[in-house]
Image (cartoon, rainbow, N blue to C red):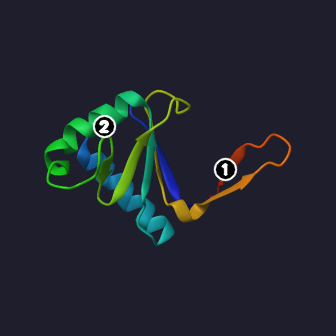
Amino acid sequence: MAGVTFTTEIVPLTLDLLTQMMLEVTRQSGERPDFIVTDKMQWGRIHDRVQSKARSQKNGVGVVRYMGAQIICDDAVPAGQVYVLNTRAIDSWKDQVSNATLAWIQG
């Protein structure tokens, strides 16, 4: 498995919890996660918690990083979900019929 999923509707998201999730992916895959996908509300919470640390880094506008992983929000992510992933486990390809880019997460 190259990623973990966590629902924050039951337990509030904290940096300690996010760190535990990152360490679990590292333990399971042998590699450090580099990509976190979540909903807008969770992204905002993470942003607020790491903002003071991020100010000293040149991440760019709207880019949040934690422990080296880029964190993005996606409208397709169910509310309260946080996906911690290693991008080596994500394959993508272009569908010739629909011209859409598709992704598959291994694990």
The answer to whether 73 is drawn above or below residue 69 in the figure is above
Name the residue type under label 2: Leu
Kindly state the secondary structure of the residue where label 1 is placed.
strand
Q: Pointer 1: what residue?
A: 103
Q: Nearer the viewer, residue 89 or 28?
A: 89
Name the residue type under label 1: Ala
- For this view, does 93 lie left or right of residue 11? right
The answer to whether residue 45 is seen in the rendering is yes
Q: Quadrant of residue 42?
A: top left
Query: Where's the C terminus, which quadrant?
Result: bottom right
What residue is shown at x 13% (from left), y 45% (from top)? 52
| Residue 92 picture location, percent across and down | 67, 55
Q: Nearer the viewer, residue 100 or 64?
A: 100
Q: Pointer 2: what residue?
A: 13
What residue is shown at x 29% (from left), y 53% (from top)? 66
Lower position in the chain sequence, tag 1 or tag 2? 2
**Callouts 1 and 2 close, C-beta under 8 Å:** no
The answer to whether 52 is drawn above or below residue 48 in the figure is below
What residue is shown at x 42% (from left), y 66% (from top)? 26
The answer to whether 59 is drawn above or below residue 32 in the figure is above
Report the mark closest to the observer, 1 or 2.
1
| Residue 104 picture location, percent across and down | 67, 52
What residue is shown at x 43% (from left), y 61% (from top)? 33
- For this view, does 35 lie left or right of residue 50? right
- Residue 14, numbered circle: none
| Residue 89 picture location, percent across and down | 59, 62
Query: Where's the N terminus, which quadrant?
Result: bottom right
Q: Residues within 10 Å of mark 1 (few under 14, many from 20)?
A: few
Q: Residue furthest right?
A: 97
As measured in the structure, the alpha-carbon distance from the residue carrying label 1 to the one carrying label 2 is: 27 Å
The answer to whether residue 9 is seen in the rendering is no
